[in-house]
Image (cartoon, rainbow, N blue to C red):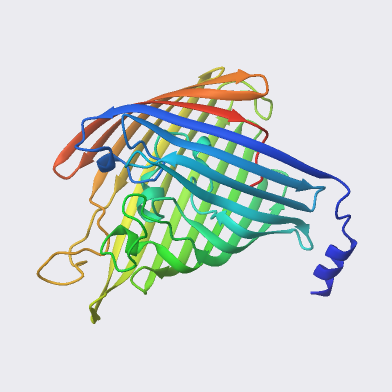
Amino acid sequence: MKTLLSFFLTAPLWSEVQLDPTLHINGVIGATSASSFEEVGGHAHDPNDNFALQGIDLGLSLRVDDWLAGFINANVFTDSQHELDVELEEAFLRFQELPGGFDLRVGRFMNRLGRQNNKHLHSWDYVNSDLFTSQFLGEEGLTSEGVELTWLTEFDQTFFAISSSYGQAVTHEDHDEGPADPHDHGSESAYFSDDLITARAIFGYNHTDFHRHRLGLNGAWGDNGYNRNTDLYSLDYTYTWRENGVESGGRELSLGMELAYRDVAWQHPDNAANIGNASQSTFAAFASYCFAENWTTAIRYEHLQGREAGAELHLGDIEYAFDSEERYRLSLALTHNFNLGDHDSFLRLQYSHDEIPGESADSIFLQFGLNFGHGEVR
């Protein structure tokens, strides 16, 4: 404690303060053969109409020398009722280069869990979210208010980093029906809703400047809407080849996979003796190829295990611990980036095929994005 106190007392607090505003605008035009966009969506920023404003993301990054950073942002978007909604996504301070090589984040932040959850909408590789993010982590992904400690060590060709957080999972309002009912029988109750612990470990190995490997191990443990616990585990791996190595430009190929599993302990709200556990898993395989300057093509295959037998909340009326049905999804995307001076933009064309019980759906989307400002504090 004395060492940590002396660090803050001797740090050059305000020798250089930098504030960097950012603005990201994402919109999408699309059509689907499904009965509704909700059938093929799941995330609050997934396409929900023939035209949708996925997000106007306003952010501000703070940097003070090398020891302090911070970030705050809000997202404005249209919900499935065609009304504007606003979400405070993040508001945190990050204390960097602490003794022992640690970093500390304090405030509201998107948890480092899996390959997508910590990314904002404008950084997604596809028009819509991964099934793991929307079905396991919630309509807005997983955000918590608390503290996160990160430790990183690097060698010549490898690095190892581990981040662990403790806090309260942020429960979001249902954008269609007002505040979520904590006793709702469905996906919402299976999500994290109170005390939450998360951990993500990343091992990186650079075989050469041209070949990179990244392996991530993730865990999350916390209270759910049934006043019991949800446990979640996942693994992700990405291999990247770059034609020019560490230099910019050139062709680039990425291949990877993500596997996730969760166990939901449920309890019927009207009968405390009626309890049980239900498990669910997802698998995703993905690849992307930058074949020419500013042109990238990508493919993603996903499988979501559905409701399992024996997960009913009570006999008679069938109510499951989570209402996700088994589904398969294949997505093909073509993205073109435009470099326009002090800002950049992109156009993305995507086709998706969803196999849902009782329905096969084909969807096509054209997404546009405008990005202003420098890199954000993460």
Q: Position of residue 63 (x, y in %)?
A: 76, 46
In the orientation shown, which residue stands out farthest toward the front? 83
Looking at the image, residue 287 lies above or below residue 100? above
Which residue: 44% across, 55% down?
A: 234
Query: Relative to the observer, which residue lies in front, 182 or 273?
Result: 182
Query: Relative to the observer, which residue lies in front, 68 or 325?
Result: 68
Q: Position of residue 181 (x, y in %)?
A: 32, 64
Q: Is residue 364 visible?
A: no
In the orientation shown, which residue stands out farthest toward the top? 292
Looking at the image, residue 98 lies above or below residue 363? below
Q: Position of residue 4 (x, y in %)?
A: 80, 68
Q: Position of residue 22 (x, y in %)?
A: 63, 36
Q: Is residue 362 found left or right of 43 in the rendered image?
A: left
Q: Is residue 239 found left or right of 149 in the rendered image?
A: left
Which residue: 83% across, 63% down?
A: 8
Which residue: 39% across, 71% down?
A: 229
